[in-house]
Amino acid sequence: MSSFPEQGPYPEQAGLPAAGAHLAQVYGGVDLAEASRQLELAAHDIAVAASCIGLGDLDEAHTNVITARAAADAAEEILRVVLGSGLGSPL
């Protein structure tokens, strides 16, 4: 049972997507600009991590590498959705 009684016991009633729902089904269209933005964020985080390593701040470098990986993973997922759904033009 949900801890929020007004939402009911099922995620779909709470406004959450059903388990196994495809990203394109959940969000409608897919924006390739978002994949580009995520890759730019990843590149920035890697540059910051390299600077942190140069300054000897390995903890901050580690944090930035983790966020870069998350951004790259997000971009990959967007591209997989576009390529798997036929929503985009051929690359």
Image: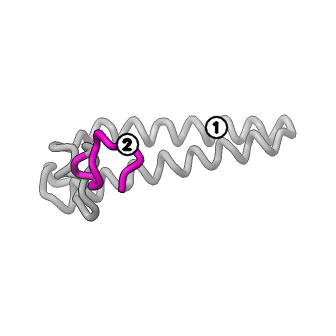
Q: Earlier in the sequence, mark 1 or mark 2?
A: 2
- Vertical side of 6 occupied by 72: above or below: below
Pointer 2: what residue? 4
Q: Quadrant of residue 27?
A: top left
Pointer 1: what residue? 47
What is the x, y in percent for residue 29? 16, 43
Label 1 element class:
helix
Q: 10 Å neighbourhood of mark 2: few (<14), some, or many (≥20)?
A: few
- Vertical side of 22 occupied by 38: above or below: above
Q: Amino acid at mark 2?
A: Phe
What is the x, y in percent for residue 75? 39, 48
Q: 10 Å neighbourhood of mark 1: few (<14), some, or many (≥20)?
A: some
Which residue: 17% across, 52% down?
25
Q: Amino acid at mark 1?
A: Ala
Q: Residues in magenta?
A: 1-13
In the rendered structure, the answer to whether residue 63 lies left or right of residue 44 reads right
Residue 54 versus residue 14: which sits nearer the camera? 14
Label 2 element class:
loop
